[in-house]
Amino acid sequence: MVPEAAAGAAPLIIFIAAIFTNNILLSNFLGMCSFLAISKQIKASVGLGLAVTFVLATTSAINWVIYNLLLVPLGVEYLQFIAFIIVIAAFVQFVEIVIERFSPALYFALGIFLPLITVNCAILGVSLFMVIRNYSFARAVAYGVGSGIGWTLAIVAIAGIRHKLRFSNVPKPLEGIGITMILAGLMAFAFMGFAGMVDIK
Amino acid sequence: MKERLYVVGFMIVLGLVAAIVLTAANALFKPLYEANKEREAKGNVLIALGIEGWDKTRVKTATMETIKTAFDEHIEEVTVEITLGDGAGATTKPVTFYKGFSAKPHTDETFIGYAFLITGAGFWDRISGYLAVDPAVEKVIGITFYEDNETPGLGHKINEPEWQRLWLGRSIFKLGTDKPWIGIVPPGTALKSNEVHAISGATETSGALQKFANSQLAEFVIAVRKHTGKSPSE
Amino acid sequence: MADQVATTPAFLKWFKTKKGAAMIEQVWAENPIFRQILGICSALAVTNLLRNTLIMCVALIFVNVCANMIISAIREFTPRRTRMITQVLIIATFVIIVDLMIKAFAYEASKQMGAYVGLIITNCIIMGRAEAFASKNTVSMTFWDALGSGLGYSVVLIAVALIREPLGFGTLFGYRILPETPIFQWQLMVLPPGAFICLGLLVWIGRSLIPEKEEAAAP
């Protein structure tokens, strides 16, 4: 009679949950800064989303390693905030250089938003949640990738709706940020319908 | 070159100052945090075992000393090394559980039961609590949770006494077998002796709870049998 | 500066000192939230309980003020190239301190707030003020600016919490103020969608109240 490891759901389940039921933007409020500024243009949203997903996947992996193989053994878990944010900043810098080299068009479109990825709450948030929930490496990466895709899904969907709204009669005080918030709320509400879709057993 | 040196020097000094400040802050505040955690754990062991009417409000308002005294008076902590698996793949692991007594001296007459930690990933975040079983290691005599971030009104209802009461008296073994398992089944289905009804609507939380609670239940059973030297059939 | 002071409501005219103007500018006229709603990100999560919201606001003001004052104090010595990483490092240090303090003194709240205290680091308000103000102004001016922007932020968060907690739980600050009927156990308010919608509605109300003049001046 061998009890199996008492851990959470399998990486695949976490991946799917991160996109739908535990969407980092619609359920955890993270990543709204950059999203609010850009979500009017669908193409740019997709581009930013892909960049964010890539950064999320890699930084979750790197931060997992740093936390579990460096900070914990040394007993300095409380430095995790600093370590994570430095890793993220450095990595985004690297991504910026790569995008500039390989796709000047994308670089031109994203412009100011690349530095914004560094302070994108979602990226730091994913690393912090991964630590709190004690994910294994596989689960951490699954969570990172899933969160990125979920974030992209959310901002592209909202960008699409805002695009459609441009001919609607939105009351002046509600224009821009107000209506976007309400949209996000309704979308978060809709995503809640996914609960129970994934069976954590 | 001079500028580069300055930049590097600046960052190093900044880093050092930050490190010193943080180490000091950590040394200053961590003990309080640890004390809080210990208070919570000890208080909840008392609650799970139903000792002297300890409940959530009392634990919240009581001082650390009160809880410590009550804990020392009524509880014994036991850690047992158990072996999991056979042969080459075997691993050992320490398992801790608590024995609760109604009063000192700690004898068979005053023995109330065992309690052990159940903790694991819930649907949203970590869930932690204590499960208490009777001295014969057959039935549940108490359960309590102290940490969860589940959906209020759904998963979070595991904290409600009405739901926790469903666990009392349930067998911890599948009927007629030696396999420790408490099933959390959909509301409305007929209950076997080792099952409780889930909270309606909280499928994910229930599933997660069932998974880790039973895993830790199994480990506890192995540990307590090793501790008392009794084999399954006794 | 004089223009913006002139457009603030009459009852605030006594804030005409330079420092007062700087602070009040942040809280009302230039209220970062009403204008940009950028930094609201992470903190919305805790607004379903007033107690946690207040702790978050205090934490944010503490970090905003302390970090920005230090950033301002060393602005002459900070190499241009490392400005951003320096700001992040200083902010992160104070966030860690605040997190340790919350874990020590408000244990229950810290469990509910989870990772969101740590996410103050990426709070756009703090970074924004560091870049736009602290790195270019004196320490004492920075203090008022940081205090003001922190308060402006807090006003909005508390406003959201004042809607979410009574409607979602029927309590305020843990004390029951509304009967325990289903109307006041409105799940939607407790969960994320409620926060978004409340914020959207508050923005609607807020922007309806601010005079047209400032709408035109905004970028």
Image (cartoon, coloured by chain):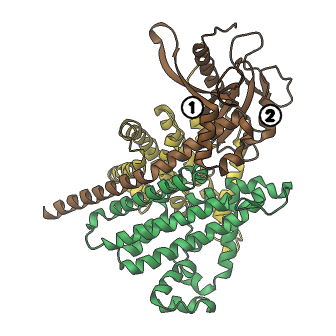
Chain colours: A yellow, B brown, C green
Q: Nearer the viewer, residue B205 or C66?
A: C66
Provide residue A149's location: percent of width, then percent of height: 54, 44
Q: Is residue B125 visible?
A: no
Q: Residue at x 40, y 66 (%)?
A: C67
Counting from the top left corner in percent of width and height, residue B76 is at: 59, 28
Q: Is residue A190 left or right of residue B224?
A: right
Q: Nearer the viewer, mark 1 or mark 2?
A: 2
Q: Where is B25 relative to B119, above or below? A: below
Any mark on residue B107, and which?
A: none
Look at mark 1 in the image and give the residue it sits on. Answer: A12
In the rendered image, which quarter is residue A198 located in?
top right
Residue drawn at (66%, 22%) of the image: B107
* Relative depth, front residue between B226 and C190: B226
Q: Please rate how many residues cluster around mark 1, counting C-alpha atoms within 10 Å: few if below 14, some from 14 to 19, many from 20.
A: some
The chain holding disc 2 is B
Residue B186 spot, x, y in % from top left: 80, 30
User: In the displayed structure, does residue B80 sit left or right of residue B154?
Assistant: left
Disc 1 on helix, strand or loop?
helix
From where the camera sits, is residue A170 visible? yes
The residue that appears at 49% across and 75% down in the rendered structure is: C147
Q: Residue at x 70, y 74 (%)?
A: A171
Q: Which residue is mark 2?
A: B165
Dot 1: chain letter: A
- B225 or A157, which lies in front? B225
